[in-house]
Image: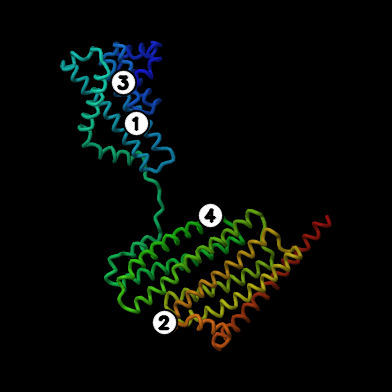
Amino acid sequence: MSMTAAVSVLTESGVFEKMLTGLGGNHVIGYLTGAGVAFVLQSSSAAVGILQAFSASGLLTFNAVYPVIVGIYLGDCVTTAIVCSIGQKAEARRVGIVNILYNLSKSVLVFVVVGLLYRIGVLGGLWDKTVNSGIIANTNSIFNLCCAIILLPVIGGYEKLSAKIVRPDKVPENPYKDKLDALNPAFFGTPALALNSCHQLLLTMLLNARSNLETAFGLLFSYDEKLKQKVDEEEEYIDQMTDAVSKYMVELLPHLHETYQVGILDQYYKVVTDFERIGDHAVNVADSGAKLAAASTEFSLDAQAEIRVMKKLLDEILENALAAFKNRDEEAAFAIEPLVELTEELISKLKMNHLGRMVTGECSVYADACYMNLLTDIQRVADVCSNVGEATLVRANPELANREHDYFTSLRSGRDETFNAQYRKAHEYYTGLMNQEKIEALPQKNMKAMKGNLTEGA
């Protein structure tokens, strides 16, 4: 009743009534009319309801109505297919294609079967009979039910055809999939295998983060948007590996019964977050490169010289951290500490140097924040490597576990001669290298100053 009242105005106009009653001799037009109405209304139920409402005129025959009903199926599914295609993945678009294929098959099936039944005389009494809302509803239900039963066996064919029509989305395969797959719960019964899987994935994380940091530093001097995107993509992989190995270690812990195995897992717990942080700092350095490029500026020649030296120092620290973790190398782990101490001292001096350049205007305001952030990232990467070295030493010397803070504090206090000797050697080498880099940059610096004076004079 509500649908009849809703379309009463259209019924009274006589336009739609004449259109529908004139379809008896042209099934194609009737089919397209049903499809068009369903497409506009975006609902097959509403379209059938409107058809039922018009049937109250008493002028619609079965011959005129059934092609419209079949057309409604297509119009509704086209709307669904469009919705499934807008901004959706391949699987969603395939749903829309399957829907269209099914309803096209449904249309052909209904036309063929109804035509055959009419020719053999089964529908002779119904063909030109005036239909009411009940006949329309029953016809719609019979069409839907019979087609669903008959076409059910070929649904798989629709799926295969849709896969050919809509190609799968290109999803880049995770290059570290083999390492992630190795984190298999089946290894819990053999802890040595499970711990080895953790070690291999953590080692991959460290190598990846280190490579990312190398790329990021290059962007400070020669920016490339593609390389910046690569840094961001690799960071996502590092994050995925961090989540996977952290979850795996939590699940592995109850299966460890030997003290030394718990000690190994404890080291891995400590370093997994540190490796992830190195990746984060690589992104920070790459972001600094992007900011410099966006501002069309660069570091001063002195600042560039300082960065190159600090990068070399950081490379040595990372190399020791890699050896310490990969091979449980105590010597490499110990060597990290004096280098980290030197890093802190040099960064303090470099900040003072930078302030001096800011006063004289040698360094631009845009580069100021990038340079200070860069020094912070270098310091934090060095601190992370220090954590890796400490975890390695504690694992190799379990007796340090309860006094590791006192032990490493005593090293930095100057009471260990080996530490002091390594620090002095590194200090002499890197301060000399810093002076040499700045001396080599003098010709370029003087040339740049001369160009600036000539420009001002002009």
First of labels 1, 3 by sequence position: 3
Instruction: Look at label 1 and name its amino acid.
Output: Cys
Between the residue at mark 4 and the residue at mark 2, the CA separation in whole angstroms equals: 42 Å
Between the residue at mark 2 and the residue at mark 1, the CA separation in whole angstroms equals: 68 Å
Instruction: Look at label 3 and name its amino acid.
Output: Val
Sort mark 2 into few (<14), some (14-19) or many (20+) by Cα contacts within 10 Å.
some
The residue located at (75%, 63%) in the rendering is 361
Q: Which residue is under mark 1?
A: 77
Residue nearer the viewer, 90 or 447: 90
First of labels 2, 1 by sequence position: 1
The residue located at (40%, 48%) in the rendering is 170
Task: Label 1: state its secondary structure.
Answer: helix
Between the residue at mark 4 and the residue at mark 1, the CA separation in whole angstroms equals: 42 Å
Instruction: Look at label 2 and name its amino acid.
Output: Ala
Residue 245 lies, in percent from the top left, at 38, 65
Residue nearer the viewer, 359 or 131: 131
Residue 195 lies, in percent from the top left, at 35, 71
- Which label sits on residue 396? 2
